[in-house]
Image (spheres, rainbow, N blue to C red):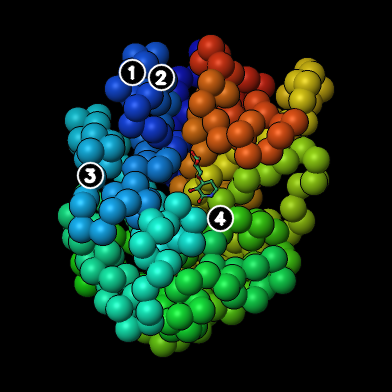
């Protein structure tokens, strides 16, 4: 693109999820990531199941490689994620309540403490809600009760006092029962003085489901509580096969997310879940859909990229 890199088009952080193995193995992948973005989110490397699959045996190799890459290239880091029901080590699921609480505290202290001062923002709790706004019945919710979320934020703040702490979820882009529940929760956490600083909106969208309604209003209501908002995992799935028309529709969706973020001063980050169709979680998880990123498999910019950076 003649216009220069995406990160130079806005005063928001512009990020991408990154995988350490591709960074190590593919020079062109690394080059485009380094050129276009000023923030990175480890795609899997900081998840509990990655860092402590076996109790007490830590593997920080992928996370450290990304933190080191970010330091060398001047990138900001979004840490992802401390407490999540998915990609959770098996051994955690079997603990009884009192021990689980200590283990959760220890996990947060160990991981957030290891990277203290190096992480701009942490997704402290990920995907805590069901679609109807009730709490997802995770092992944390079932054994520790509602308070596990406030506890997690307090422990994360103690471990890394300068990091901005976020709750993150999907299908909370627009106004709906799930985002209403998120709103009520963060309002109550703020009122109780819990150290929460932001709401992460994943923004995994699909052309098959339409664009969520009320995204600007939704971002604005979180900001009005005194919280930052981040678009944390944007991608737009295309029902295959790809056509020129669908690529334009995809560009419309990306542009609407971008514009909704830019309409609210406290929407501080626009991060995509990977940047190239060469490496995307979408085809594995959503059969029949794909091509969800801003760059194609050969790292050529797609219409959606050009829409954000004309
Ligand atoms: C996904 C990764 O992209 C995949 O590589 C992995 O197999 C599963 O997790 N919401 C999240 C992310 O918060 O952590 C998920 O990442 C995608 C959905």
Provide the residue designation for mark 4.
201
Task: Judge: label 2 CB < 8 Å from ligand 1.
Answer: no
Query: How far, Cα to Cα, is label 3 from label 2?
Result: 22 Å
Q: Does the CB distance between marks 1 and 2 fall below 8 Å? A: yes
Q: Earlier in the sequence, mark 3 or mark 2?
A: 2
Seen from the viewer's position, the closer of residues 43 and 56 is 56
Provide the residue designation for mark 2.
29
Residue 221: x %, y % from top left: 60, 69
The residue drawn where x is 59% and y is 70% is 136
Query: How far, Cα to Cα, is label 1 from label 3?
Result: 18 Å
Query: How far, Cα to Cα, is label 1 from label 4?
Result: 30 Å
Provide the residue designation for mark 1.
25
Q: Earlier in the sequence, mark 1 or mark 4?
A: 1
The residue drawn where x is 75% and y is 21% is 242
The residue drawn where x is 28% and y is 71% is 103
Instruction: For marks 3 and 4, give the one nearer the viewer.
Output: 3
Q: Quadrant of residue 224?
A: bottom right
Residue 47: x %, y % from top left: 37, 51
Few, some or many C-alpha atoms within 10 Å of disc 2 (few <14, some 14-19, many ≥20)? some
Provide the residue designation for mark 3.
60
Instruction: For marks 1 and 2, give the one nearer the viewer.
Output: 1
């Amino acid at each position: 693109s003649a216009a220069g890199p995406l990160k130079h088009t806005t005063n928001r952080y512009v990020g991408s999820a990154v995988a350490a193995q591709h960074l190590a193995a593919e020079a062109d992948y690394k080059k485009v990531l380094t050129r276009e973005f000023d923030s990175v989110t480890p795609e899997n490397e900081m998840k509990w199941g990655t860092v402590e699959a076996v109790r007490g045996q830590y593997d920080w190799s992928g996370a450290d490689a990304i933190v080191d890459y970010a330091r060398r290239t001047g990138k900001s880091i979004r840490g992802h994620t401390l407490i999540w029901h998915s990609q959770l080590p098996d051994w955690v699921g079997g603990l009884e309540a009192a021990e689980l609480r200590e283990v959760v505290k220890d996990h947060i202290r160990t991981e957030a403490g290891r990277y203290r001062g190096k992480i701009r923002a942490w997704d402290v709790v990920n995907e805590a809600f069901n679609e109807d706004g009730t709490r997802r019945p995770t092992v944390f919710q079932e054994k520790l009760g509602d308070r596990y979320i406030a506890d997690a934020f307090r422990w994360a703040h103690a471990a890394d006092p300068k990091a901005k702490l976020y709750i993150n979820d999907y299908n909370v882009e627009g106004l709906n029962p799930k985002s209403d529940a998120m709103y009520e929760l963060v309002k109550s956490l703020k009122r109780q003085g819990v150290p929460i600083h932001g709401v992460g909106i994943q923004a995994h969208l699909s052309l098959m489901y339409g664009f969520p309604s009320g995204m600007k209003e939704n971002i604005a209501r979180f900001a009005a509580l005194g919280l930052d908002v981040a678009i944390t995992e944007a991608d737009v799935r295309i029902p295959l096969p790809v056509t020129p028309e669908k690529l334009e529709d995809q560009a419309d969706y990306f542009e609407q997310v971008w514009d909704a973020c830019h309409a609210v001063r406290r929407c501080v980050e626009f991060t995509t879940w990977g940047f190239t169709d060469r490496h995307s979680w979408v085809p594995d998880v959503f059969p029949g859909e794909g091509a969800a990123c801003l760059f194609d498999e050969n790292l050529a910019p797609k219409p959606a990229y050009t829409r954000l950076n004309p």
